[in-house]
Image (cartoon, coloured by chain):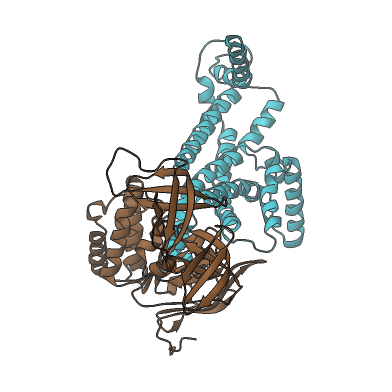
Chain colours: A brown, B cyan
Amino acid sequence: MTGKDNDKSFIEVRELSKHFGEFVAVDAVNLRIERGELFSILGGSGCGKTTLLRMLAGFETPTSGRIFLDGVDITDQPPYERPVNMMFQSYAVFPHMTVEQNVSYGLQKERMPRNEIASRVGEMLALVKLEDYASRKPDQLSGGQRQRVALARALVKKPKVLLLDEPLAALDRKLREHTQFELMNIQDELGITFVVVTHDQEEAMILSNRIAVMEQGRFEQIGTPKEVYEFPCNRFVADFIGTINTFEGVVQTSGEGEITVASDECGHSLRAYCDTPPRNGSDICLAVRPEKIYISQTEPDNDEDSCLRGVIEDFGYFGNLSLYRIRLETGKVVQVSAQNRRRSTERFLEWDDQVFISWRPRSAVVLEN
Amino acid sequence: MKRQSRFVFSMLVFGYAFLYVPLLSVVVYSFNDSNLATIWGGFSTRWYGELLKNDQVISALLLSLKIAISAATLATLFGTMAGIALSRFGRFRGRNLFTGMITSPMVMPEVITGLSLLLLFVTLQQLTGWPTQRGYATITIAHTTFAMAYVAVIVQSRLAAMDQSLEEAAMDLGGHPFRVMLDITLPLILPAMVAGWLLAFTLSLDDLVIASFVSGPGGSTLPMLIFSKVKLGVTPDINALATLIMLFVSAGVLVAWTIGRRMQRP
């Protein structure tokens, strides 16, 4: 079972499934992760992401499919033989051991000589900045410190892959931001492949080289954060990552990478670019991100852009930006966000103001049904 | 509001009095100088002295302690194994049956437990020649069977409250399942095992009914001795003995409770 594979992908998951009775948690997924990548699996609760991670760690036995790591089939290896370590969502720091004992546990199981263990543990504690806490017990540590113990403990064995289950979920906002960058630095320094499972899209965006968006046991899209955000491949992904406005419509004219769409929802025809234009008359959906839409009180004179008229139904002030909900004449509500570039005590836009919203044809994503 | 609280308070006093005045009277009368257990004749500790000179009482006490220690130890061993099986082995075949069978001695009338064990021992003796006489061994086995139910429940609840990813983390770090059990699981359920041991010890020390069924001539435990003495009339040294037992049992319960409290801490 351990023959070298021709394929050069570092982690390769082939047609992997996990069924719990009738319920299909993971449904024949395929995945390739390269060496040194920081890869995120993003999805809502119950989408199967944790089950997938647990199969990579060896805690769940796949119903079918294989997992290869560095060319070796590890599907049938028990967790204690896999060159993979995991950082648990609860951190799972052993409460009856000191920080040092926690970190050295994995090396002791490897029967590493004592002096070597001491130096490796010291190195790791320095990396996560916990040198001064070596003899503390976990109940004397803060949440952030416990997390770093868990990280050091998982990294000390120099695994080929580090699995992280919701690594930042239990931290408060300030600490999260700090830890995000720390994780990225550590990953960079050690060159270990990270696989992160998260439900937090912001976390996935900032951390990862690539993201897999998961839903009902399948991957909806795998790509860089930019690809997933700017070029979502379907409605689920578009809707799941960030907010997006969707306009249902029918393709009117289609040619040379450009289409016009008749949309009853906004009472206008809209223009959009796409590489493989759908046929005339097909039902499609145009999706536009709130920050791609301009808002103005005068009609923009650029007739290339799609332009709609509406009134401000509601708005929210977030400091750095403002979010507007604009009701079109047809009754559809469009979300628009605008940077608050100017510092001013007076408000420019108020409730019930008549406004024009417009966007570039290139800003709209064409989603086929 | 005020009225109600006075009512509640008097109910409380009445309730406690109902529970503790009889016990207190035993303690007070243990210091009675009179030869008659129910008539006060001045303060004295002579019955405690008499007690120490009474070989019958001393040997019954030693037998009781020997049985309690052995039974509690065996019950902790088997109960812990059962508790781990119940909470960590997932859904195995016959799990519900096992759960029911583990906890049934807790709800089974003692008379029935005692009777069925007696029948077991008698049949065993006819078939295999063992046990040749009923006493220490048979009572220990009987006490183990019902005390392990309590230990199993305590250990199981401790394991249910424990984060299972601790064991997974240890396994992930290279610990084989058996090592993980020794390194992680056992140290973390140790308080539950100690509490279970103390409970089993107390239960064994208290038991009269089951012991009466499964013991034979010469194998009298302390509760059995007291019971038989009381049937001949209450003598003051029984009061002294009862006081000592109360002291001992409450100390045990207090220790078990303290350990249990410490266990609650995450």
| Depth order, front residue of A246/A29 | A246
Image check: B254 left or right of A301?
A: right
Whether residue A110 is visible to the viewer of this picture, yes or no, is: yes
Locate residue A236, reporting x and y percent. Answer: 54, 64
Locate residue A366, reporting x and y percent. Answer: 50, 69
Relative vertical location of residue B179 with respect to residue A318 in this rendering, above or below: below
Relative vertical location of residue B192 with respect to residue B24 in this rendering, above or below: below
| Depth order, front residue of B243/A23 | A23
Quadrant where the C terminus of chain B is found in the figure: top left
Image check: B102 left or right of A293?
A: right
Locate residue B63, reporting x and y percent. Answer: 58, 42
- At 22% from the left and 66% from the top, the residue drawn is A119
Whether residue B176 is visible to the viewer of this picture, yes or no, is: no
Relative vertical location of residue A191 with respect to residue A139 in this rendering, above or below: below
Locate residue A49, reporting x and y percent. Answer: 51, 65
Image check: A354 left or right of A191?
A: right
Relative vertical location of residue B152 with respect to residue B262 in this rendering, above or below: below
| Count of numbered labels shown in the rendering | 0
| Depth order, front residue of A318/B129 | A318
Residue B128: quadrant of the picture:
bottom right
Quadrant where the N terminus of chain B is found in the figure: top right
Residue A11: quadrant of the picture:
bottom left
